[in-house]
Image: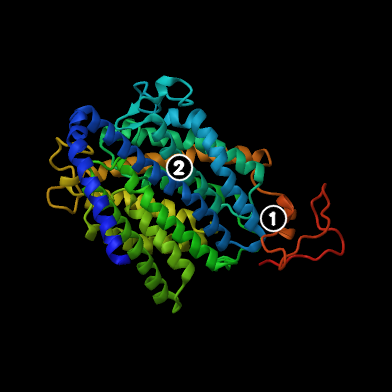
């Protein structure tokens, strides 16, 4: 009886619902106007804005990846310093990019092709909220801020454990408000390299080469860490953290590269090839680095393998929308080997790049740019640059030619020259001011103790009860921290 009563109630409810739909459903559906072109345009803007914002959040998440990776790859005496430097660069970068950087990068060109002259402090004036193509200026600001923060934080890895904290704040400001935005304008803001047809889809040149050059210069101007032994990598204090940081960066790359479509409606095919090529680059890069190092040392090296994945990701970033998956595999594999050979070169030149930042970002960034000139498919880049040029494709691809490779070379060299000149002036001035390298006392007690009075593992490396505030030295009788 109970089941029968339940069945009857359900049938009664369904009957009432059917009567309501019959009576009002038709009139309700016809009460709405048919969708207009404006409705579809608004929907496209909403979807594209959501896509760019979500991918921008992933790019910003890379800040955590850089911080954790760097922390794990250096000694524990510099871990707190590395964490704080990576963290504050997000805040400093946000202000600098809003005040000046974004305008120099994406503002209206004054005709020189060198820098923008508008869009400073976007959002202050209502006119600044106008749409930038299919997304608003403010959406574009946030997405590009995440890129700027990434370019700035690359530098800290190479200069880890020995940089004056105030000096770090100063060079972060200079890079974000001046050095980096100018290159952005040249390539993505309609500047002279864009006009030549230079191709860098997601930043092998704009982000990684710029960050890598500044990182290398910083390491040169600073000099090596006190206990550096040439020809031997300083032992990372926590490879588990380094692995976590690397995986976070890989996840973030799925915002970095696919988000550079600046929209999702109508570009599903492009997003698909970008994601595929990004995955191939990172995956093959780690394998090539791992096996190459094994053949050299007879050991399966985790630290090298981690950098190999990043090398492959950097290598495909410029061309991920314009090359085939087979080309992406080649680019990633070569990147995994380049990162090791560049590290060997730095050791011979006695340049102490603490986490291999220039090996990953500079060496592989340049390779990625040149690889576009070798492997770009003419059918994929026609909308991007020089569609009237029938040979605007990779040198090694049917239908391509040497023109694109020459343009890529010019763009890469120009970026390197700009960064070397401006970076040398910046670091030279900081060194003259005594604000580049931390006090030598930090070499003895550790930069965490000297600059922050803290330890990442206080139960293993305890903080002395009292550190002299004037000399920042460990008082007599206190426990002297070990090197690692």
Residue 387: % across, % down? 16, 37
Which residue is farthest bottom? 298
Which is more toward the observer, 210 or 21? 21
Residue 168: % across, % down? 61, 43
Which is more toward the observer, 66 or 411? 66
Q: Residue at position x 60%, y 48% from top?
A: 85
Q: Is residue 448 left or right of residue 133?
A: right
- The C terminus appears in which quarter of the rendering? bottom right
Residue 146 has which mark? Answer: 2
Within-10-Å neighbours for mark 1: few <14, some 14–19, many 20+: many
Which is more toward the observer, 230 or 300? 300
Residue 337: % across, % down? 37, 64
Which residue is farthest front? 1
- The N terminus appears in which quarter of the rendering? bottom left
Q: Residue at position x 26%, y 61% from top?
A: 7
Residue 483 makes an appearance in the image: yes
- Label 1 residue SS: helix
Which is more toward the observer, 184 or 341? 184
Where 70 sits versus 130, above or below? below
> Badge 1 is on which residue?
448
- Residue 447 appears in which quarter of the rendering? bottom right
Q: Is residue 462 left or right of residue 47?
A: right
Residue 190: % across, % down? 32, 30
Residue 301 has which mark? Answer: none
């Amino acid at each position: 009886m109970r089941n029968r009563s339940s069945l009857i109630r359900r049938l009664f409810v369904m009957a009432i619902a059917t009567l309501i739909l019959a009576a009002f459903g038709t009139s309700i559906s016809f009460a709405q106007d048919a969708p207009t072109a404006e409705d579809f345009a608004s929907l496209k803007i909403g979807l594209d804005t959501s896509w760019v914002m979500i991918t921008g959040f992933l790019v910003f998440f890379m800040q955590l990846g850089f911080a954790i990776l760097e922390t794990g790859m250096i000694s524990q005496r510099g871990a707190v310093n590395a964490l704080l430097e990576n963290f504050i660069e997000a805040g400093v970068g946000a202000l600098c990019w809003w005040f000046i950087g974004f305008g120099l990068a994406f503002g209206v060109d004054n005709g020189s092709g060198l820098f923008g002259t508008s869009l400073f402090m976007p959002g202050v004036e209502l006119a600044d909220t106008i749409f930038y193509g299919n997304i608003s200026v403010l959406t574009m600001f946030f997405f590009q801020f995440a890129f700027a923060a990434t370019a700035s934080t690359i530098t800290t890895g190479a200069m880890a454990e020995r940089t004056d904290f105030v000096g770090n704040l100063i060079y972060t400001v200079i890079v974000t408000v001046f050095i980096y935005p100018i290159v952005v304008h040249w390539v993505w803001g309609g500047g002279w390299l864009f006009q030549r047809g230079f191709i860098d889809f997601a930043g092998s040149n704009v982000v990684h080469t710029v960050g890598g050059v500044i990182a290398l210069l910083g390491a040169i101007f600073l000099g090596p860490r006190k206990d550096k032994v040439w020809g031997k990598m300083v032992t990372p204090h926590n490879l588990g953290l380094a692995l976590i940081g690397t995986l976070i960066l890989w996840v973030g790359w799925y915002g970095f590269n696919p988000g550079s479509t600046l929209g999702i409606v109508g570009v599903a095919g492009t997003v698909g090839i970008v994601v595929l090529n990004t995955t191939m680059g990172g995956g093959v890069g780690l394998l090539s680095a791992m096996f190459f190092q094994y053949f050299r040392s007879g050991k399966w090296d985790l630290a090298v393998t981690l950098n190999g994945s990043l090398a492959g990701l950097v290598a495909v970033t410029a061309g991920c929308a314009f090359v085939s998956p087979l080309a992406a595999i080649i680019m990633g594999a070569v990147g995994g080997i380049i990162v090791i050979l560049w590290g060997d070169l730095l050791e011979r030149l006695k340049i102490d790049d603490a986490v291999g930042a220039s090996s990953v970002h500079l060496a592989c960034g340049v390779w990625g740019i040149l690889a576009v000139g070798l492997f770009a498919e003419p059918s994929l880049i026609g909308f991007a640059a020089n569609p009237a040029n029938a040979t605007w494709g990779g040198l090694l691809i049917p239908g391509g030619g040497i023109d694109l490779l020459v343009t890529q070379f010019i763009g890469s060299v120009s970026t390197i020259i700009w960064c070397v000149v401006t970076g040398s002036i910046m670091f030279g001035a900081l060194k003259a001011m005594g604000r580049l390298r931390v006090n030598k006392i930090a070499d003895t007690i550790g930069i965490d103790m000297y600059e922050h009075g803290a330890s990442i593992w206080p139960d293993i490396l305890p903080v002395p009860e009292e550190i002299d505030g004037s000399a920042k030295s460990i008082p007599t009788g206190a426990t002297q921290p070990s090197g690692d």
